[in-house]
């Protein structure tokens, strides 16, 4: 719930448990959730696994404890054993960085028995374990890992890695690979897909894992998703193939576990993602995302693919929303999924058989739900749910209810009794073409006509995104506790408002998305409790792009904060991790760079007068730091008042607690200086 608390700040937020990766045991008796908190030194976030009672009668209890913490990849075996990934050291191995199973940064696969007790190591590849899939009725597991070229086994790969370390070699050689890096890491050595049957016995380790993609170079299914048929005989993975650039695609590929034979199930016409095998093993549900073009925006669909023939049909075809996270009902009669929906992330159910075939119902509208876990009896559905004002909590839904209010489990992981200070409201404005522009406003309770609050505008990233959930990195309540009101608009190209809303901003980032943000600001500032004379704007990623565009096209804001932002789109195309992807929307920059030039904020550097705070991380491969360096050079060259906050050890997101603290301290000091007229106070550690 929300309420008054003038002491809410970054450290109070940091104390809140961060829940993710909710899983339900096969018998429905145990919920497992990952809970992240700062490590003992406060230098990074570390996760532990907790058990929560679905019946909500027993208190939650912690299952794992390690300095390294546990990663988010978790899955139940049919017998109730829990698999998880962790970089904790093997207690039975002599510490040696070159030996599989020793303490190192890569994630190994561990097993926690259903009756509790000590976790045991199953396999620790030098290249780590990426992603995790388990068969429903067989002890078969699939996972991704990375092997050096020429290594056929995990042992050979470890020897290769040891030899490289001893020689002081870190170089990588790419040949036909594309992309060569993803998010914040380089993709070589090559990625592989492994499958193995787990041996019986309390001391057994996973020694023999079959490489289903020897010599392959596919994007790890940590990003694309994979599943196994209930009998454990077939692994379905969304495999990334480059073909000829820019023909990047992700196809569904079925691997026969016994023979290793691969069958491509989809025709290479789109990106297929998050496959989910049906309980009878005959079909797979997946998300199909069209590529889009310069004229038509991409579109996401829920499809059902026959595993024998590859034939597919679209489910919920009349729903004007983008489906995500498909999960089967235990009896196979329906599929649950989430979708951005008018400033929320709603839960839907679509029937896939019988008289109600393809009938769609919305189970929950308000809030943002994820990690759907259907109970084996088919009556209930568990999920994580957050709101703009509350962090994720575990909730229970009626599996057939319509627009219901979820029941929050009382015996969950304690939040520490912290209450956020912001009053959350839903606002609407009207664009020039009559389109409704919705926003979330989070304001101080004490704001009034007599004492209006200064306004800070948050523009979301994506660009295909929406403000609809609690945010750890862009938390409005920290600013509200400082006295600011925060407006989060959803302009053209936002998700959750229908395909027409996306089309309005497609290949026109500087058009309707910009004017929609301005319309939302104008509408909000009609309120007497907001101060139109004291405003600022902030954004990250696409939101940073928009912050840069705003800076060059209006002087109405007193300050602008631009984080991990796009500045010059032709240079961005060649340095981002998947530059060819953008050609579907913006075209070929080598033959016709007109769109890249037209949509680049850098073209308006000569008209920027607003003070700017530039923020970027060195490890950001999605929007490389070169964008910030070019922006900073241009700002200095043109005499714009600006500051540059640089993080050498962060990626697209600021994740480490100390860095997050500095991020908020610098942003608030910058806003205070230019919006409130308070002299800038440089954070002590900068």
Image (cartoon, rainbow, N blue to C red):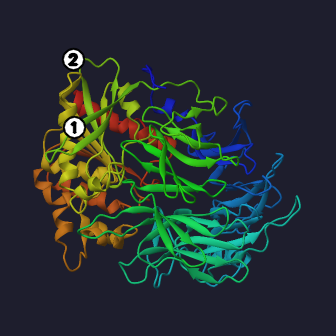
Element under disc 1: strand
Density class for disc 1 (Cα within 10 Å; few <14, some 14-19, many ≥20) is many
Q: Residue at the spot x=71%, y=83% of the render?
A: 259
The residue under label 2 is: 449
The residue under label 1 is: 429
Instruction: Please identify the residue farthest to the top as the structure is shown.
Output: 450
Q: Residue at the spot x=32%, y=51% of the render?
A: 494
- Residue 105, image x, y percentages: 63, 59
303 or 520: nearer the eye? 303
As displayed, is residue 47 above or below residue 274? above
Point out the tag, 1 or 2, that comes first from the N-terminus. Answer: 1
Asked if residue 22 can be seen in this view, the reply is no
484 or 83: nearer the eye? 83
Say which mark, if any, is on residue 118. Answer: none
Marks 1,2: beta carbons within 8 A: no
Q: CA distance from mark 1 to mark 2?
A: 20 Å
């Amino acid at each position: 719930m929300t309420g008054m608390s003038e002491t809410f700040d970054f450290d109070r937020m940091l104390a809140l448990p961060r829940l993710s990766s909710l899983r339900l045991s096969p018998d429905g008796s145990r919920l497992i959730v990952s809970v992240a908190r700062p490590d003992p030194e406060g230098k990074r976030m570390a996760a532990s696994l907790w058990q929560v009672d679905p019946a909500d009668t027993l208190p939650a209890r912690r299952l794992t404890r390690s300095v390294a913490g546990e990663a988010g990849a978790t899955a139940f075996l049919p017998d109730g054993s829990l698999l998880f990934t962790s970089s904790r050291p093997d207690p039975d191995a002599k510490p040696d960085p070159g030996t599989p199973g020793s303490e190192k940064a890569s994630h190994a696969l561990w097993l926690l028995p259903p009756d509790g007790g000590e976790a045991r190591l199953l396999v620790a590849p030098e290249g780590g374990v990426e992603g995790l899939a388990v068969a429903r009725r067989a002890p078969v597991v699939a996972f991704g890992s990375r092997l050096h070229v020429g290594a056929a086994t995990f042992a050979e790969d470890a020897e290769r890695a040891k030899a490289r370390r001893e020689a002081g070699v870190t170089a990588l050689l790419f040949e036909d690979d594309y992309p060569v890096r993803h998010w914040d890491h380089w993709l070589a050595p090559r990625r592989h897909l492994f499958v193995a049957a787990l041996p019986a016995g309390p001391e057994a380790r996973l020694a023999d894992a079959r490489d289903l993609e020897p010599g392959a170079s596919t994007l790890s299914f940590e990003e694309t998703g994979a599943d196994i048929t209930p009998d454990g005989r077939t692994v379905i993975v969304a495999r990334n193939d480059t073909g000829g650039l820019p023909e990047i695609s992700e196809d569904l590929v079925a691997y026969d576990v016994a023979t290793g034979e691969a069958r491509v199930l989809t025709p290479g016409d789109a990106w297929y993602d998050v496959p989910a095998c049906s309980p009878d093993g005959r079909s797979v549900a997946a998300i199909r995302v069209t590529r889009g073009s310069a004229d038509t925006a991409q579109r996401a669909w829920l499809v059902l693919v026959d595993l024998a023939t590859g034939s597919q049909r679209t489910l919920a075809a009349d729903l004007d929303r983008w489906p995500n996270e498909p999960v089967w009902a235990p009896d196979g009669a329906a599929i649950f999924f989430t979708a951005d929906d008018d400033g929320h992330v709603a839960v839907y159910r679509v029937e896939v058989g019988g008289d109600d075939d393809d009938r769609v119902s919305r189970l929950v509208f308000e809030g943002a739900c994820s990690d759907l876990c259907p109970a084996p009896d088919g009556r209930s559905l568990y999920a994580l749910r957050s709101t703009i004002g509350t962090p994720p909590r575990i909730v229970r839904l009626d599996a057939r209810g319509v627009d219901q209010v979820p029941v929050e489990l009382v015996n969950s992981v304690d939040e520490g009794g912290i209450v956020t200070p912001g009053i959350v409201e839903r606002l609407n404005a009207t664009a020039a073409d009559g389109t409704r522009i919705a926003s979330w406003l989070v304001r101080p309770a004490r704001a009034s006509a007599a004492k209006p609050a200064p306004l800070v505008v948050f523009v979301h990233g994506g660009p295909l995104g929406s403000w609809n959930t609690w945010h750890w990195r862009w938390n409005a309540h920290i600013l509200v506790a400082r006295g600011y009101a925060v407006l989060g608009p959803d302009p053209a190209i936002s998700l959750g408002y229908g395909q027409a809303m996306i089309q309005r901003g497609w290949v026109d980032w500087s058009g309707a998305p910009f004017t929609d943000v301005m319309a939302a600001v104008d509408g909000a500032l009609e309120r007497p409790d907001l101060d139109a004379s004291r405003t600022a704007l902030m954004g990250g990623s696409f939101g940073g792009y928009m912050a840069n565009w705003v800076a060059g096209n209006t002087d109405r804001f007193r300050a602008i904060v631009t984080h991990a932002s796009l500045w010059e789109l032709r240079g961005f195309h060649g340095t981002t991790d998947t530059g060819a992807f953008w050609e579907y929307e913006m075209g070929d920059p080598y033959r016709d760079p007109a769109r890249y030039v037209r949509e680049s904020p850098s073209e308006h550097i000569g008209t920027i007068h607003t003070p700017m705070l530039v923020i970027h991380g060195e490890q950001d491969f999605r929007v490389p730091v070169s964008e910030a360096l070019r922006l900073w050079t241009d700002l200095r060259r043109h005499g714009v008042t600006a500051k540059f906050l640089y993080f050498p050890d962060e990626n697209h997101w600021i994740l480490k607690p100390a860095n997050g603290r500095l991020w908020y301290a610098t942003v608030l000091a910058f806003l205070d200086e230019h919006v409130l007229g308070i002299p800038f106070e440089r954070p002590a550690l900068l």
